[in-house]
Image (tube, rainbow, N blue to C red):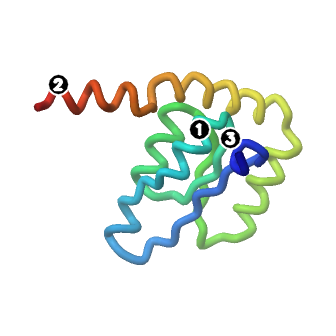
Amino acid sequence: SYTKTADIGLSIIENMSLSYYYALPNKLFEYIMAEIPVVVSNLPQMKEIVEKYKVGMVVDIDEPGKLVEVIRQLTENEVLYNKFKENCRTASQELNWENEVKNLLEKL
């Protein structure tokens, strides 16, 4: 219920190890399911989801000014924000447990 009230979902992870480098946080999918545009760190797994489904923006966290700029862009550009929101709705139809369990069961 808290997530649904957010305007922008942040999944900012510092690249401190291979585990972090390849992280794909559940929170990212929670934001997408809640139709909340996301801002994620420029790490391969998160970047792939965001760019494939066009649900938000990717930033290099080594440049804090860029994070501020991206957040400002999302809050000021209503057309862009609504497009990401709409894309979240579409992505949530594919990125959900019901679909994943089918894939899992097919591999067994």
Query: Residue 56 appears at what percent x and percent y?
Result: 63, 41
* Image height of 86 relative to 15, above or below: above
Query: Residue 72 appears at what percent x and percent y?
Result: 83, 53
Q: Residues within 10 Å of mark 3 (few under 14, many from 20)?
A: many
Instruction: Choose between 53 and 94: the one closer to the eye.
Output: 94
Question: Which quadrant holds the C terminus?
Answer: top left
Instruction: Choose between 44 and 36: the one closer to the eye.
Output: 36
Pointer 1 with pointer 3, Cβ within 8 A: no
Q: Residues within 10 Å of mark 1 (few under 14, many from 20)?
A: many
* Image height of 83 relative to 23, above or below: above
Q: For residue 32, which numbered disc appears in the image?
A: 1
Left or right: where 69 falls relative to 103: right
Query: Residue 49 appears at what percent x and percent y?
Result: 47, 40
Residue that numbered label 2 is attached to: 106
Pointer 2 with pointer 1, Cβ within 8 A: no
Q: Residues within 10 Å of mark 2 (few under 14, many from 20)?
A: few
Q: Separation of disc 2 and disc 1 at Cα? A: 25 Å
Residue that numbered label 3 is attached to: 37
Q: Amino acid at mark 2?
A: Glu
Question: Which quadrant holds the N terminus?
Answer: top right
Residue at x 75%, y 68% (from the top left corner): 65
Left or right: where 34 falls relative to 98: right
Q: Amino acid at mark 3?
A: Pro
Residue at x 48%, y 33% (from the top left corner): 52
Q: Separation of disc 1 and disc 3 at Cα? A: 7 Å
Q: Name the N-terminal-most of marks 2 and 1.
A: 1
* Image height of 38 relative to 107, above or below: below
